[in-house]
Amino acid sequence: MLKKVSVLVAGSWGTALASVLAENGRHVLLWARSEEQVQEINDKHTNHRYVKDVVLSPLIKATSSLQEAVEDADAVIMVVPSSGMRDVASQIRPFLKADALLIHATKGFEAGSLKRMSEVMAEELPECDPTRFVVLSGPSHAEEVVLKRPTTVVVAAQDLQAAEAAQDLFINGYFRVYTNADVTGVEVAGALKNIIGLGAGLTDGLNFGDNAKAALVTRGLAEIARLGTAMGANPLTFAGLAGIGDLIATCTSKHSRNWRAGNQIAQGIPLSQVLNDMGMVVEGVKTTKAAYELANRFEVEMPITRELHNVLFEDKSPRLAAMDLMGRVRTHEMEELPSDTLTNGWK
Ligand SMILES: NC(=O)c1ccc[n+]([C@@H]2O[C@H](COP(=O)([O-])OP(=O)(O)OC[C@H]3O[C@@H](n4cnc5c(N)ncnc54)[C@H](O)[C@@H]3O)[C@@H](O)[C@H]2O)c1
Ligand SMILES: O=P(O)(O)OC[C@H](O)CO
């Protein structure tokens, strides 16, 4: 029985996941970094900056002490931005029970090392069994989850019991949780969809229309699956919730910070200002850089990622990037398949 459940940290997604747990009758300890935020959550039952106009369950209590949050916890849900994962994982190491159920819901890679979040956790928490690390991902905007709108996610772990324990913890009538054994695929899909979400915002901002966005999502999925498979993922994972499911949510929703960032860049607003004004994490920016480097490392063709990289970091005009994408050398739709499969229909 998982008695003490903690969520790190009280951003949008951490607060939304804490709300799901509270809905399931769990007392949740939510770590917030500022005393002001702790007081707001404990006294007013709100977390206004991150989840507007929502009254939180009294079962959610906040603390600014990582030790208090993690000590004796039976389950710890890590929802820190990818840039903070290593630091927070190393800080909780002295307090974390080795057999605690460790779940992360972060969508990104570590900048520089290009590691997946479960790899970073494994390095910083060597006492814990990495086969029991769970990743939770899928199409899930915090803004809708706190309103109890129907949502589906996937939890992946190498160890089936760990995945099922996470499924039991979160599943309820509006939050349906599926299991999957492909940790690499779910992590890669969750991180890379943000790049395409940025691209969808750009596409919409440039008024390119519905055909262009459908093309972006479909060809985006193709290059996500290409890199993911090279990194050891099961290609089928990309047809699931963490793959096409989250691409649809991110590329079509104005809740998406990545979509909004892309949309603002299309209006000519400088990236630094876009990020500053957002006031919340836009993982797709750093992930574009990481994926560009991963594509080089794994020698995988990722034209959309490359063009977005050039728009974000090389000052390339988004229109020119789109023209260059459209003008690429002609190719087969399923270019990554073995050549006998490609020619099969024409024999
Ligand atoms: N918001 C969503 O709908 C949603 C849904 C699914 C997954 N996610 C993922 O969850 C992760 C967190 O996103 P979010 O939406 O909660 O972001 P957010 O911007 O709403 O909140 C980020 C939180 O992290 C804290 N923080 C920032 N830097 C930190 C650091 N270095 N160490 C510790 N804490 C730090 C901030 O104080 C804030 O509380 C991201 O990887 C995101 O992709 C978000
Ligand atoms: O707001 P975004 O773009 O970070 O997306 C949030 C979630 O990942 C959607 O599933």
Image: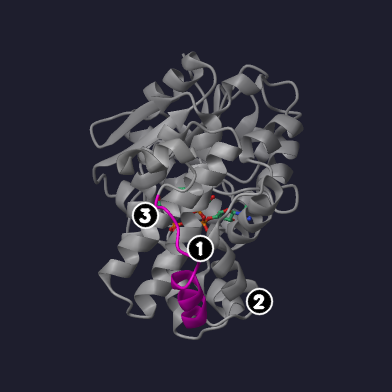
Q: Residues within 10 Å of mark 2 (few under 14, many from 20)?
A: few
Q: Residues within 10 Å of mark 1 (few under 14, many from 20)?
A: many
Is residue 327 highlighted in magenta?
yes
Q: Quadrant of residue 254?
A: bottom left
Q: Amino acid at mark 2?
A: Glu
Residue position for label 2: 314
Residue 235 position (above or below residue 167):
below
Q: How many marks?
A: 3
Residue position for label 1: 304
Residue 333 image point, x, y percent: 39, 52
Magenta part of the chain? 318-333
Residue occupying image coordinates x 50% and y 28%:
182
Residue 120 image point, x, y percent: 70, 38
Residue farthest to the front?
Answer: 347
Q: Earlier in the sequence, mark 2 or mark 1?
A: 1
User: Where's the C terminus, which quadrant?
Assistant: top left
Q: Amino acid at mark 3?
A: Thr
